[in-house]
Image (spheres, rainbow, N blue to C red):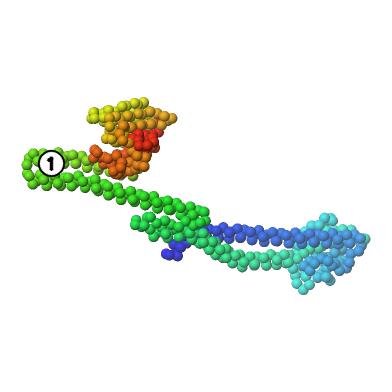
Amino acid sequence: MNGLRGLTTVRARTTMAATVVVALALLAGSVLLVRTLDHSLATAADQRAKSRLAELLDQARLGTLPTVVDGIGDDSLAQVVDGDGRVVAASANIAGQRAIAVPRETGERPEPRTMRGLPDDNETEDYRIWSARTDTPDGEVAVLVGPSLEASQEAGDQLVTSLVYGLPLLVALLALAIWLTVSRALRPVENVRREVAGLDARSLGARVQVPPTHDEVARLAVTMNDLLARLESAEQRQREFVGNASHDLQSPLSVFRTELEVALARADLEEWQHTGRHLLTENAHMEALVGDLLFLAQADESQPGARSALDLEDIVAEEVARIAAGGRIRVDLQTDPVPVHGNRQQLSRMVRNLLLNAVEFAEQRVAVELREEDGTAVLVVSDDGPGVPEHDREEVFHRFFTRDQARDRRSGGTGLGLAIARSVAKTHGGTLVLDGTGPTSRFVVRLPTL
């Protein structure tokens, strides 16, 4: 099983694929080489035979033809036959032999044919014979010249034998070279994998070493470090989230216990009524906290909820009317119709949280403005309170943000309102920021319109 798993690695698959491709290319090249060699040898032999044939034809016409024909090469033969079939001249290797063939009725244009079992000294061989006729002072003769096929066959056979033994060795050496090259290329990847495999929840602050190669492996290491940084940040936020949630839930539970112990100790009806009112108040705070936690959990799981086309002006006007009913702070409203596509319940919660935050810290007045600007819905909620310092401008959107130098949550809120508002804006493709310079309390929401 381990051997089978080894064949599925990137290194093994790359080596096998590259080796097969190169082996097929070498095989095709070898076949082409053998065919090219055979063709080249045959063409060269034919050219020599036709050249010598032309010389013998000229000598025959001039009557200067020698009895023994030379200059044709060790692997060729030549013969001149008269009209009666007598051999007039021949090469040394077939001297004294009868006519090897009766020439066809052809003119002076050479014609080839393959003849097998022709004599060659004490042996017989196959030849490719070129023949032609011509007139001589003694009458018409036929001249036959041709190379042996054995010479070219032997050269081709030697090449094939060399390729049969050499190609497998070459492919094996190539496979080894590819294996070593791929192994060396993948070594940094394996180092990154080994370093990441050694990390756990307690060592997310560690980072993998980035090789100084500026290649894909280096970019992989940088990406892995970015991922580890995000995981570390997420894990840190989770710890803070759990700690803050536990603290905020523990407070009302402690109040519950204290109130109940006091009421039980006094066993007075008026005291029980007083305890009941306190418990209801703390229960409302717990419900609000649990509701906010549930909403953020659903937002973290990317659950956008059902969406439809709606007018953001209606939602803003409804939430402003609800807040203004308290009467403590004046709310100035200036809106225009702005169509958007979203979840009504979530958008209402976003607007409500912004208004509650503004009312909580306003001295006398809250201003709400809604308009459409370049295809974007712009909602501005501001108050005349002390504002948020510039260094806390992003911190206020963090969950359970309660630092003393920031705004104090005098209403006993959950510390999740602004985090929820930004989450809703983000899931609707928009943004929520604190706008302006210096301490400011001007929250600006931008959402895409229909």
Q: Nearer the viewer, residue 180 or 338?
A: 338
In which quadrant is the N terminus drawn? bottom left
Q: What residue is shown at x 11% (from left), y 45% (from top)?
A: 262
Q: Nearer the viewer, residue 253 or 94?
A: 253
Residue 180 percent coordinates (x, y):
53, 63
Q: What residue is shown at x 8% (from left), y 39% (from top)?
A: 270
Residue 108 percent coordinates (x, y):
84, 56
In which quadrant is the C terminus drawn? top left
Q: Quadrant of the rendered structure where residue 24 is?
A: bottom right
Side of 312 relative to 210 (left or right): left
Which residue extends farthest right? 137
> Which amino acid type corresponds to the residue marked 1 in the rendered image?
Thr
Side of 111 relative to 204 (left or right): right
Q: What residue is shown at x 73% (from left), y 62% (from top)?
A: 41
- Helix, strand or loop at label 1? It is helix
Q: Is residue 344 visible?
A: no
Q: Quadrant of the rendered structure where residue 136 is?
A: bottom right
Side of 226 relative to 266 (left or right): right
**Above or below 320: residue 417:** below
Q: Nearer the viewer, residue 35 or 54?
A: 35
**Above or below 96: residue 111:** above
Q: Is residue 229 visible?
A: yes
Q: What residue is shown at x 40% (from left), y 59% (from top)?
A: 197
Residue 303 percent coordinates (x, y):
33, 41
Which residue extends farthest bottom? 122
Q: Nearer the viewer, residue 266 or 4?
A: 266
Neighbour tally class for label 1: few under 14, some 14-19, many 20 plus, Cα within 10 Å: many
Q: Which residue is mark 1?
A: 275
Number of on-image labels: 1
